Amino acid sequence: MESTMNELGNAASVLDIDPKTAVGGGVEDVYGEDFATEDQLITPWTVSVASGYSLLRDPRHNKGLAFTEKERDAHYLSGLLPPVVLSQQLQEKKLMNSIRQYQLPIQKYMAMMELEERNERLFYKLLIDNVEELLPVVYTPTVGEACQKYGSIFRRPQGLYISLKEKGRVLDVLKNWPERSIQVIVVTDGERILGLGDLGCQCLPITIDVGTNNEKLLNDEFYIGLKQKRATGQEYSELLHEFMSAVKQCYGEKVLIQFEDFANHNAFELLAKYRTSHLVFNDDIQGTASVVLSGVVSALRVLGGSLADHKFLFLGAGEAGTGIAELIALEMSKRTNTPLEECRKRIYLVDSKGLIVKSRFESLQHFKQPWAHDHEPVKTLLEAVNALKPTVLIGASGMGKTFTKEVVEAMSSFNETSTKPLTASILNHVQRPLIMALSNPTSQAECTAEEAYSWSKGKAIFASGSPFDPVEYEGKVFVPGQGNNAYIFPGFGLGVVMSGAIRVHDDMLLAASEALAEQVTDAEYEKGLIYPPFSKIRKISAEIAAKVAAKAYELGLASRLPRPANLVKYAESCMYSPVYRNYR
C-alpha cells in the first residue's frame, strides 16, 4: 500500500499531516491544543453564538424538531436536524408516551432531568400540562430517592456549589453564575433532607457544602461533596454570614432567600438572625406551617366550630412541628383577639421523650419551650391521645408507621361522626377526627391513607405530605389530600417578588394560608379533600400571590409602586410561559 501511494508522484499522502493544520478539517491549530502534552496547560476557548450546533445544545433556546424551516435557514440548522417539523404539542405527546414506559419512578425522574438539560421550555410544558402525574416524579416522594442517589446519577451541574474551600471569596463564586437578575434563591446545607437526614452536597439550586456526618456518603467513591465531617460553630456561621452578605451585595436588597432543609438548630437560628436584615423565608418552618394551617382552616367546614374550639396534638417538635403550631396559634389569636400565649395552650407536642410539659422546661431546646404546658408527664403518643383527646392529630416526626392502629382508633372513638353522607348542606354539622401524616417521603409517612380510613372506619379526614391513591372503604371512595409545600412557596415567592416586598411578615404567611383554603370547592369537600387538586396549581398560585402582595402593601412592606389595580391578573401576567418563542 505504501509503495502504491508513493508511485502517485509528488502528491502528498493523507498520512502526511501538515503540522499547521488540525485534525478537524484543516483548521489551523492556533492554540496548540492538538500538540499539547497531557500535563501542558491549554485555554478552553469557545464561541458564544446561539446559532447552528450551539443553539441545539442551549437548553433555554433549543426547540428540537419544532424549529420551523425558516428558523432552520436563518440560524444555520439546515442539515443538523431531520427534515420533519413537529409542533410543541406533538413533542409533548411523544415524550409523555416515552416517560410512561418506565416502570421505576427514579427512571422517570432521570428522563425528566435529561429533558430539562436539553430543552427547558418543553420540560416545563410537560410539567405544567401533566402536573398531577409528574409532580410526584420531580418532587416528593421520588426526589427523596434522587437525593440519596444523586452522586450516582449526577450528569452535569445545574446549580451553584459553595463549599468551605470558597470561604473568603463567596462573592466571586456568585459572580460566576451567568444570570445577573436574580429574584429568588433556594439554599440548603443538606443536613436534613425531607425525613432522610444528612445527605450532604446532593440537592437544591445553591448548596452550602460544609461537609457531612453521613458515614455512607463519606465512604462512597461517587460522592460529589466535601469528604469531611460537618463544620460547626464559628466556622459554619462565618461561611453562612459571608454568603448572606454576598447575596445582598451581588443581587440587591430585594432578592428572596428561601432556606430549605437545614437541621433544626441552624434553621431557627438563621431565620431569627436574618429575618430583620434580609428578605428570608424558611420553607420547612414557615412554608410547611402555612400549607398545614390552610388544611386545618379548610377542614373546619367539615369539623365544625372555630380553630379555638379544637385541640391539637403534634407528633414531632422540630422546625416543621413547632412552625406549624406557632402559625396555628397566631391565626387563632388573630381570629379570637386572644393573647398568643393563651392560644398555645390548645396545642400540645410530643417529641422523642414524650409529651412536652413544664417539668421538662429546663432541658428543652429554646424553640420547644413555648409548648411546655402544665400536664403530668406522658411517655407515648397513644397515652397522649387518650389523655388529651385531641380533635386534630398532626405528624411531623419524620418517622414512618408511628400513627398506629391503636392511635387512629382512639382518635376516632372520641370524635364521633354522623352516619349521613357528606353533602354541602351538612358540612358544618359533622364531627370527625382530622389526621395529617405529613412526613416525607412516602416511606416516612406516619400512616398511609388506607390505614387512616380503614382503622377509623371511614371517619377520618386525612391528608399527607406525599401523595396517596384514592381508597375505597365499604363502597365509598375517599380521596386523600396532600399537604404539600408546593401549594405555598411558588405563589408566596411570586407575591413577594411582584410587590417588591423588603421583608417577610407572619401576616403574609397567614394570607397565603387563607388564600389556599378558599380554593377548595364543595364538590372537593364531598370527596374528602381539604386541598384543591394540583391540576389548578397555576390559578391557586396566582390567588396566593395576590393575597400575599396585598398584605405586603397593607403592611407598608411593598416597594413596587404604584400598586397594580388587579393583583390576580398582574400575578398571572408575571408567570412563566413554556410556549416556544419564534426566532427572527
Image (spheres, rainbow, N blue to C red):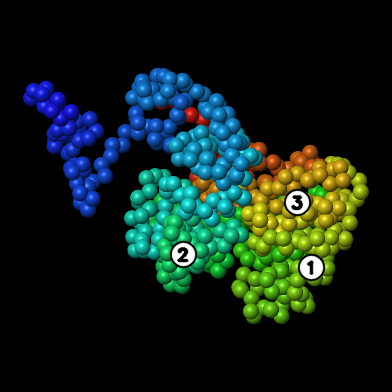
Residue 449: assigned label: 3
Against 568, residue 149 (above or below) is below
Quadrant assignment for the C terminus: top left
Against 135, residue 343 (above or below) is below
Residue 235, given in percent of the width and then of the height, sits at 42, 70
Residue 53, given in percent of the width and then of the height, sits at 35, 31
Identify the residue at horizontal 60%, vertical 45% (top origin). 105
On the picture, is 349 further left or further right than 367? right
Residue 218: assigned label: 2
The secondary element bearing badge 2 is classed as: helix
Which of the pair 522/120 is nearer the observer?
120
* Amino acid on which the number 2 mark rests in the picture: Leu
Residue 382: assigned label: 1
* Amino acid on which the number 1 mark rests in the picture: Leu
Identify the residue at horizontal 46%, vertical 71% (top origin). 232
Cα separation, mark 3 vs mark 1, equals: 19 Å
Quadrant assignment for the N terminus: top left
- Is residue 347 visible in the rendered image? The answer is no
- Is residue 497 visible in the rendered image? The answer is yes
Of badges 1 and 2, the one in the foreground is: 2
The secondary element bearing badge 1 is classed as: helix
Identify the residue at horizontal 50%, vertical 58% (top origin). 188
